[in-house]
Amino acid sequence: MADHTEVEEVHEDSAADVTSAALEVAPYNVAGSRGPRFGAPLVEYVLRLGDDRLVLGHRLSEWCGHGPILEEDIAVANLALDLVGQATMFLGLAGELEGAGRDADALAFFRDGTAYRNALLVELPRGDFGFTMMRQFLFDAFSVVQLDALASCGHAQLAAIAAKSLKEAKYHVRHSGEWVVRLGDGTEESHARISRSLAELWRYTGELFERDVIDDAVEAHGIVFDHEAARARWEAIVHDVLQRATLEVPAPPIMASGGRRGRHTEHIGHLLSTMQSVARAHPGATW
Amino acid sequence: MLAARDDVMAVLGTVMDPEVPVISVVELGIIRDAEVHDGVVSVTVTPTYSGCPAMREIEDDIRSALLAAGARDVQVQMVFAPAWTTDWIGPEAREKLRAYGIAPPGRAEQGGLITLTRRRAPVACPFCGSSDTRLQSEFGSTACKAIHSCNSCKQPFDEFKAI
């Protein structure tokens, strides 16, 4: 199949791409047995896409059985399933591009926190339901913009996964956006609480639009992502919803950053210890 | 014997969606290609939703149905492009969904980045046909369904979501 040829070519390229620039951005890649062995920009890039969705999907799944109402319990579990499904596609591709025999499961369950490349925003504890929905909305709005751009990028496999995921991200942002409006423009209590969530989360949004050497390097593979244009589209969506939610756009704080390079909050370790426990206790088990 | 593509498609026409067992995987639109060479069958499938837990079972069902029909070997490949759309579900299959109590999907959204507010006609109740229905939740028992409720016959029902 044509796809197959593509993989071979890309793999050759990515092997050649392990340059000092890549190592500079990810010096943590000096491998322990479970540590990250990669560093090729294209692999790093796809991992970022997969890890954002895997970690957020896991956070959402924590609501399963604890949703505020039955319909929402089901909705959140559905959203989590979509995100984990998207992560499986992205991580599967990352493993294929890495060429070291790791599949999506190996990448999800046998990497430690420092090897994860998700943005800090998605690993924060779920908080109350309003916090979960505000975080979800801020990410979903980013996700539709990001996937929409990648769906027409020059890397065929990545574009296919982006186009597939975009269909889902569209109804995700509608759902989370509706909750932001409902809670923001709701009762005094819901307004106060979701305002606090917004203030707390805002400083984690800057990282989504950071550009580094990985983004520059993947342009050679036809992946050109304009971070500034994306930020403008994201702001248009976010400002519109916040306004309808009677919430104020927070003043720009100092933005938190580090997840893309493996420098995480303490929360990632706790999350992974739950998420990876079964796979690590029974390596190779299937069910 | 499985000698040609048509034979393979005929067998696949008997493999039902495990969650909606009144329509086949062919009617669902997820079979993108099928080939047979010397008894070895290769089927190309596209997933419905990226996290659909039934995909694995569907793959197994496809494999066992074809082996039972005489295939020497079966290869199932997954493709993501073009992304699956409910627009690939034909009129006959839509009628089967309705008869089963699931409102068939409307037209999938075209273009546009997002629509943050929904403006859509009410979905007709598959039981009494009334249009006096309301959306309860965009998320239902499976990724592909939304929950509605009929104000006329008071019956809750599923809708196969347009995507």
Image: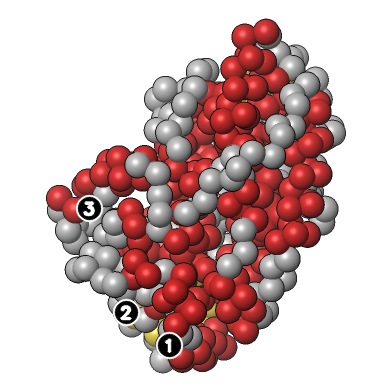
Q: CA distance from mark 3 to mark 1?
A: 29 Å
Corner quadrant of residue A268: top left
Q: Position of residue A265 (x, y in %)?
A: 40, 44
What amino acid type should be assigned to the residue bearing mark 1? Ala
Q: Position of residue A96 (x, y in %)?
A: 41, 77
Left or right side of A30 for A189: right
Q: Residues within 10 Å of mark 3 (few under 14, many from 20)?
A: some
Residue A100 is marked as 2
> Which of A10 and B132 lies nearest the eye of the viewer?
A10
Residues at discs 3 and 2 in contact (Cβ within 8 Å):
no
Q: SS class of the residue under badge 3?
A: helix
Residues at discs 1 and 2 in contact (Cβ within 8 Å):
no
Q: Earlier in the sequence, mark 3 or mark 1?
A: 1
Residue A15 is marked as 1
Do the residues marked 1 and 2 share a common chain?
yes
Q: Position of residue A57 (x, y in %)?
A: 46, 44
Q: Position of residue B43 (x, y in %)?
A: 49, 75
For the point 29% across and 56% down, the residue is A112
Look at discs 3 and 2 and give the one toward the viewer: 2
Say which residue label 3 marks.
A279
Left or right side of A286 for A236: right
Q: Residues within 10 Å of mark 1 (few under 14, many from 20)?
A: some
Q: CA distance from mark 3 to mark 2?
A: 19 Å
In this picture, is A159 found above or below B161? below
Do the residues marked 3 and 2 share a common chain?
yes
Chain letter behind tag 2: A
Q: Earlier in the sequence, mark 1 or mark 2?
A: 1
> Which of A243 and A251 lies nearest the eye of the viewer?
A251
Left or right side of B79 for B91: right
Give the number of marks. Answer: 3
